[in-house]
Image (cartoon, helix red, strand yellow):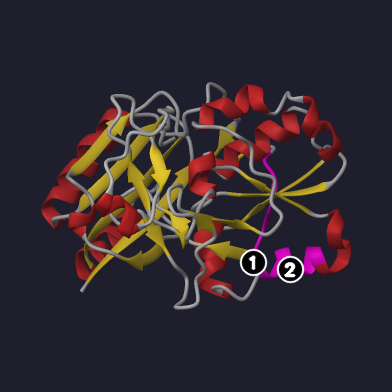
């Protein structure tokens, strides 16, 4: 049986090249594919492979002084959902152009972590005052998001550095804002940036959408499918997962996204029938995968 794991950890890494070499050796030995990004402030990975190999990887990580105790989010998938194994050293753990302070305990000054059930408790206590804030790219939110969430019109994560300065967000600065993203890593940085920019009460969903979906599936505040950056493209948390987007050609509900054939390709919401029947030459728009 094969699975996919998603994980991250913010922690100072004094020798990134040694960690790079070790990760390459470990993953190749275990036959894993996926992506791992390493910086001097942490690492972020998504790996697919045999479940026994992934558990062996987790054991090896837990034996390392820097990486023990990481929470791994498991989902259905396989090694071949990734084209290859890619492990790189980058200047930032998450590409933004701004980094929070990081110590051995993680991000300093970020939003308060809320477990999924604590999110529900906050809403019970504060009602409509609570604001869900999407920390992903806008094309991810097209197929799934939290109900009534604020979804900024950004194509890459680094756009949040200036996006949050827009006047329309001023009214949120005194509200309880719950940030969310796929597995939690982007919200570690985003929530710290929001506090830096004057947002007074900032939270983040511990473990991101993945952990929330595992707890509540489609019976909570999440609606639609979860966009993922591999061949699967999307995940549903139950058989009752809704399609919330509309096909750009026939307007039927769908969660199917297809690349256009323009030189500057972007993802379009196009149902499977229309994708098979048409050549997509819609207006180009740059989309990123940060």
**Dot 1, crowdedness within 10 Å: few (<14), some or many (≥20)?**
many
Tell whether 170 sits left or right of 79.
right
For label 1, the SS is: helix
**Which residue is at the front of the view, 39 or 146?**
146
Q: Which mark is residue 116?
A: 1
**Which residue is at the front of the view, 30 or 133?**
133
The residue identified by callout 2 is 120
76 above or below 285?
below
Q: Position of residue 37 (x, y in %)?
A: 35, 37
**Dot 2, crowdedness within 10 Å: few (<14), some or many (≥20)?**
some
> Quadrant where the C terminus lies?
top left
Q: Is residue 14 visible?
A: yes
Q: Residue at x 64, y 22 (%)?
A: 162
Q: Residue at x 57, y 34 (%)?
A: 102
Q: Is residue 63 visible?
A: no
Q: Which mark is residue 54?
A: none
> Quadrant where the N terminus lies?
bottom left
For label 2, the SS is: helix
Q: Which residues are magenta?
A: 110-123
Contact (Cβ within 8 Å) of mark 1 with mark 2: yes
């Amino acid at each position: 049986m094969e699975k996919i794991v998603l994980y991250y950890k913010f922690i100072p890494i004094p020798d990134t090249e040694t960690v790079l070499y070790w990760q390459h050796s470990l993953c190749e030995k275990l036959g894993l594919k996926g992506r791992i990004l390493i910086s001097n402030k942490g690492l972020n990975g998504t790996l697919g492979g045999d479940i026994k190999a992934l558990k062996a990887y987790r054991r090896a990580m837990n034996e390392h002084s820097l990486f023990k105790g990481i929470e791994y989010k498991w989902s259905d998938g396989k090694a071949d959902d990734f084209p290859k194994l890619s492990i790189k050293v980058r200047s930032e753990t998450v590409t933004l152009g701004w980094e929070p302070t990081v110590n051995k305990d993680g991000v300093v000054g970020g939003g308060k972590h809320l477990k999924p059930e604590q999110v529900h408790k906050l809403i019970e206590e504060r009602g409509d005052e609570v604001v869900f804030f999407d920390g992903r790219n806008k094309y991810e939110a097209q197929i799934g998001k939290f109900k009534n969430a604020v979804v900024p019109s950004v194509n890459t994560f680094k756009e949040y550095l200036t996006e949050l300065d827009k006047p329309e967000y001023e009214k949120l600065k005194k509200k309880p804002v719950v940030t969310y993203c796929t597995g939690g890593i982007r919200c570690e940085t985003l929530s710290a940036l929001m506090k830096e920019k004057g947002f007074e009460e900032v939270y983040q969903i511990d473990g991101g959408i993945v952990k929330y979906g595992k707890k509540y599936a489609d019976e909570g505040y999440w609606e639609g499918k979860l966009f993922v950056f591999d061949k699967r493209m999307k995940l549903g948390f139950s058989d009752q997962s809704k399609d919330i987007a509309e096909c750009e050609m026939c307007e039927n509900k769908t969660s199917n996204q297809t690349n256009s054939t323009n030189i500057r390709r972007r993802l379009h919401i196009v149902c499977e029938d229309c994708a098979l029947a048409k050549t997509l030459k819609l207006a180009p728009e740059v989309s990123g995968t940060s």
